[in-house]
Image (cartoon, helix red, strand yellow):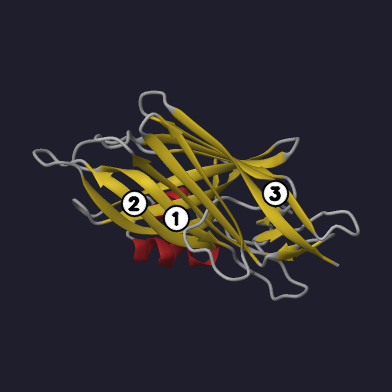
Amino acid sequence: MRRIALSGLLLAALLGVGAIASAEVAQKGSLRVNFEGKIAPSALPRTGQTPVNVSVSAAVSSTGATAPPPMQRMTIAINKYGHLDTARLPVCQLEDIQPATTDDALAVCKRSLVGEGRFLATVLQKGLAPFPSDGKIYAFNGEVEGKPAILAHVYGTQPAPASYTIAFLISRSAGTFGTTLRATLPPAKEGSGYITGIFLKLGKSFISQPTGRSYLTASCPTPKGVSKAVFPFAEASIGFKGASVLKSTLTRTCKAKG
């Protein structure tokens, strides 16, 4: 069984009723990254685990006159209280969805689907000023060289139809943050674009509840008599072309039940 500690994943665009949310802005000079996060439901068991859905986002912008530089690396370290369980999920293979359209990727790896969302990008086109674009993302349970990963399949149509897959490699670590996700983004080049924002909703129940399994689960391990807890749930770091790195620590409040 593969069971990976994963609590309070990262960052969100739509903050709905019954969700625990956190937001943070990191800035260096004119370069800014806005991180947001949502986890639902907001009431979590004091002991044991309950299925959750998580929305995530990281959006890059500039407060100056120039466009932000391309992202090159993304690392997210996540609090140890919670789990990511892939034990009975089919594994999507990188070669099956790269390259592929959104429809083709979903047709091949639908049973491995664990999330979906959108991306924002800046397109570089010869003779034109950089312009914005967006497109669809599907997130699949996958592996890279035999190690667990989230494969984020990105597909856009500007300036021409193109796809690539961002592999978030998942590893375990000791301490407050028990799970780390690391991704290397493709380099920007003329005629294509580079990502400036990622928005994902993750979560999947793949065996019927209440006795079944869920891709994401979490708990709120507070002492008896304490109904809420505030604690760091994620550390995020984004590396940019030119060696700039922006980091942020997000906190989360959970409500204990039971």
Residue 196 placement, left or right of 38 = left
Q: Is residue 48 left or right of residue 138?
A: right
Q: Does residue 241 lie above or below 157 as drawn?
A: above
Q: Are marks 1 and 3 in contact (CB under 8 Å)?
A: no
The amino acid pointed to by label 2 is Leu
Residue topped by disc 1: 199
Image location (x, y in percent) of residue 205: 64, 69
For label 3, the residue is 4
Residue drawn where x is 85% and y is 57% of the image: 226
Residue, disc 2: 120
Q: Position of residue 213 (x, y in %)?
A: 71, 66
- Where's residue 188, x and y in %? 29, 36
Q: Name the residue type under label 1.
A: Phe
Q: Residue furthest right?
A: 224
The one nearer the camera, 168 or 107, is 168
Secondary structure at badge 3 equals strand
Q: Residue at x 42, y 49 (%)?
A: 95
Task: State yes or no: discs 2 and 1 in contact (Cβ < 8 Å).
Answer: yes
| 255 with respect to 17 (left or right) | right
Q: Secondary structure at mark 2?
A: strand
Q: CA distance from mark 1 to mark 3?
A: 22 Å
N-terminal of the pair, mark 1 or mark 3, is 3
Query: Label 2 near label 3: C-beta < 8 Å?
Result: no
Image quarter hosting the C terminus: bottom right
Mark 2 → mark 1, Cα distance in angstroms: 9 Å
- Amino acid carrying label 3: it is Ile
Residue situated furthest top in the rendering:
243
**Circle 3 or circle 2, nearest the eye:** 2
